[in-house]
């Protein structure tokens, strides 16, 4: 396994964001209580961020996109037990009433609804449903579609 020995928060950050694949071993060596507490907080934060990122990548989104890709995009999110299809009549109405102006339209099935699923299994599948994971994954999806100006 890749191994790093760190003494400061800066070294820890560099070791965590390094190019080597997970799993990896990072040994934190601290000489005083203040450094020990600080570096352990950083380890906890880094581990949490790594888990969120890993689980966010496990989500396989089901979505629909229409309208103009070079305009601000309206992102439609459904409620409990809904799906992206709940927005069909609203999207059709917006398209007809646009009056020649074009806007981007993006409707997505939230995790566990419609066609969106997590590839994670067991406990990880349950953790994939947390707000941090779903938000991170949805923002990654929007970015991958080039949606930077969302309404």
Image (tube, rainbow, N blue to C red):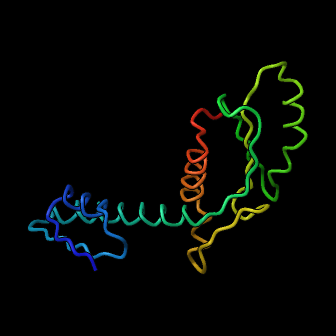
Residue lying at 72% horizontally and 33% vertically, measured from the top left: 104
Towards the viewer: 122 or 106? 106
Q: Provide residue 80's location: percent of width, then percent of height.
A: 78, 56
Residue lying at 16% horizontally and 71% vertically, measured from the top left: 5
Residue at the outermost left position: 31
Towards the viewer: 93 or 66? 66
Residue 93 quadrant: top right
Where, quadrant-wise, is the N terminus in this rendering?
bottom left
Whether residue 108 sits left or right of residue 25 in the image: it is right
Residue lying at 60% horizontally and 57% vertically, measured from the top left: 134
Residue 146 quadrant: top right
Whether residue 106 sits left or right of residue 134 in the image: it is right
Residue 120 quadrant: bottom right
Where, quadrant-wise, is the C terminus in this rendering?
top right
Residue lying at 74% horizontally and 43% vertically, measured from the top left: 65
68 w.r.t. 81: above or below: above
Q: Provide residue 136's location: percent of width, then percent of height.
A: 54, 53
Whether residue 127 sits left or right of residue 64 in the image: it is left
Whether residue 32 sits left or right of residue 130 in the image: it is left
Please tell me how many numbered marks the rendered image carries: 0
Residue at the outermost front position: 69
Q: Provide residue 140's location: percent of width, then percent of height.
A: 55, 50
Q: Provide residue 42's location: percent of width, then percent of height.
A: 29, 60
109 w.r.t. 105: above or below: below
């Amino acid at each position: 396994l890749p191994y790093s020995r760190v003494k400061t928060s800066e070294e820890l950050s560099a070791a965590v964001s390094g190019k080597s694949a997970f799993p990896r071993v990072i040994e934190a060596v601290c000489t005083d209580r203040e450094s020990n507490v600080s570096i352990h907080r950083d380890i906890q934060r880094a581990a949490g961020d790594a888990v969120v990122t890993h689980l966010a990548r496990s989500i396989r989104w089901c979505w629909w996109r229409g309208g103009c890709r070079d305009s601000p995009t309206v992102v439609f999110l459904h409620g409990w037990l809904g799906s992206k299809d709940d927005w069909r009549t609203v999207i059709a109405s917006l398209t007809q009433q646009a009056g020649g102006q074009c806007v981007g339209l993006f409707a997505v099935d939230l995790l566990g609804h419609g066609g969106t699923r997590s590839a994670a299994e067991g406990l990880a599948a349950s953790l994939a449903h947390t707000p941090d994971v779903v938000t991170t994954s949805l923002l990654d999806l929007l970015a991958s579609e080039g949606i930077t100006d969302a309404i």
